[in-house]
C-alpha cells in the first residue's frame, strides 16, 4: 500500500523540471488556425441573433448559418452568450453606429439628433439585413437564464441615452436651445422615438414612413426665443 501511494507523487514531481516541454504541446494545439473565416461566421451569427433574438436563436440555427459545427463554435467563441455579446459589439460598430457618429460629427445638437434619426430610418429598413435595431430587439422579455445578456444590453442602451443627454446639454450650454430646456427629458423623448421606429421597422414600416416620423419629431425641438 505504501509503495502504491508514493508512485503517483513521484510521477507528478519530475515534470516540474522540464516545464518548457510540458507547455509546448498544448500551446501548439491551442494555436491551431481555424478552419473557417471567423469574421464571416460572426457576421452570420449577428444576423441570426438580430432576426430571432438571443433566446430563440438555437445553437443549431447559429451553426447552420455560420457554416460550422458546434465544437468549432465553442472553440472560436466560447459559448452562446459570448458569441452574442461579440455579435452585439459587431453590430454597434457597423449598422448601429449612426447615432454615435452623428453625435460626434455634427456641429449642432439639433443637427446631431436629426441626422441620427434620419440615418436610422434608412438603416432600420434596409433589405439586406433584419429590420429594426438589434440592441433594442434582441433580448427583450428574456428568462432568468439570459439575465446577463439582458443586463448587458440594458447598460448599452443606457450609455447611448446618456450620450444623447450630454450632446443636448452641450447645445443648451452653447445657447442653441433655451436655457431652461431639460436635457434629460428631451433626450428621453428622442430615444423613445428611435425605439418606436425600431419596433415599427420590425413590423414592416417603410423608410418613407419612418422619415415622416422623424420630421414630426423634429418639430418638437425647442426653439430659442429671438426676442430674448
Image: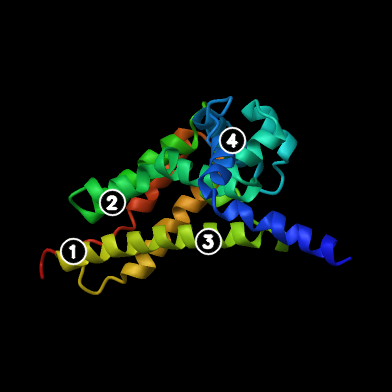
Sequence-first tag of 3 and 4: 4
Residue 177 in sight: no
Q: Say which residue appears at 35% left-offset and 64% top-offset.
A: 186
> Residue 34 in the image: x percent, y percent?
56, 29
For this orientation, the residue located farthest to the bottom is 180
Q: Is residue 20 left or right of residue 217?
A: right
Disc 3 packing (10 Å; few <14; some 14–19; many ≥20): some
> Residue at the location (84% across, 60% down)?
4
Nearest to N terminus: mark 1 or mark 4: 4
Question: Which residue in the structure is indicated by mark 2?
Answer: 103
Q: Secondary structure at mark 3?
A: helix
| Local secondary structure at mark 1 | loop
Q: CA distance from mark 3 to mark 2?
A: 20 Å
Name the quadrant of the C terminus: bottom left
Q: Secondary structure at mark 2?
A: helix
The secondary element bearing badge 4 is classed as: helix
Which one is in front in this view, the residue at disc 3 or the one at disc 2? 3
Can you identify the residue that label 4 sits on? 29
**In the rendered image, which residue does mark 1 sit on?**
224
Q: Earlier in the sequence, mark 1 or mark 3?
A: 3
Q: Marks 2 and 4, Cα distance to the nearest angstrom?
A: 45 Å
Comparing marks 2 and 4, which lies closer to the viewer? 4
> Which residue position holds label 3?
154
Q: Residue at 45% of width from left, 53% of height from top?
A: 193
Q: Distance of mark 1 from mark 3, alpha carbons? A: 34 Å
Label 1 or label 4, whichever lies nearer to me, is 4
* Quarter of the view holding residue 191: bottom left
The structure residue drawn at horizontal position 58% and vertical position 25%, both measured from the top left corner, is 35
Distance Cα–Cα, label 3 vs label 4: 38 Å
Amino acid at each position: 500500500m505504501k509503495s502504491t501511494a508514493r508512485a503517483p507523487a513521484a510521477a507528478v514531481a519530475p515534470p516540474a523540471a522540464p516545464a518548457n516541454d510540458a507547455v509546448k504541446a498544448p500551446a501548439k494545439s491551442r494555436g491551431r488556425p481555424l478552419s473557417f473565416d471567423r469574421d464571416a461566421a460572426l457576421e452570420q451569427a449577428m444576423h441570426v441573433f438580430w432576426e430571432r433574438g438571443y433566446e430563440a436563436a438555437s445553437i443549431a440555427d447559429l451553426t447552420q448559418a455560420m457554416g460550422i459545427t458546434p465544437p468549432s463554435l465553442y472553440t472560436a467563441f466560447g459559448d452562446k452568450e459570448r458569441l452574442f455579446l461579440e455579435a452585439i459589439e459587431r453590430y454597434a460598430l457597423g449598422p448601429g453606429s449612426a447615432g454615435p457618429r452623428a453625435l460626434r460629427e455634427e456641429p449642432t445638437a439639433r443637427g446631431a439628433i436629426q441626422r441620427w434619426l434620419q440615418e436610422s430610418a434608412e438603416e432600420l429598413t434596409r433589405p439586406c439585413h433584419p429590420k429594426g435595431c438589434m440592441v433594442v430587439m434582441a433580448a427583450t422579455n428574456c428568462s432568468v437564464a439570459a439575465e446577463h445578456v439582458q443586463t448587458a444590453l440594458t447598460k448599452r442602451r443606457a450609455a447611448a441615452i446618456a450620450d444623447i443627454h450630454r450632446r443636448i446639454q452641450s447645445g443648451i450650454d452653447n445657447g442653441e436651445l433655451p436655457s431652461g430646456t431639460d436635457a434629460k427629458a428631451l433626450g428621453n423623448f428622442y430615444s423613445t422615438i428611435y425605439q418606436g421606429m425600431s419596433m415599427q421597422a420590425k413590423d414592416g414600416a417603410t423608410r418613407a414612413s419612418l422619415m415622416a416620423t422623424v420630421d414630426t419629431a423634429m418639430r418638437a425641438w425647442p426653439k430659442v426665443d429671438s426676442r430674448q
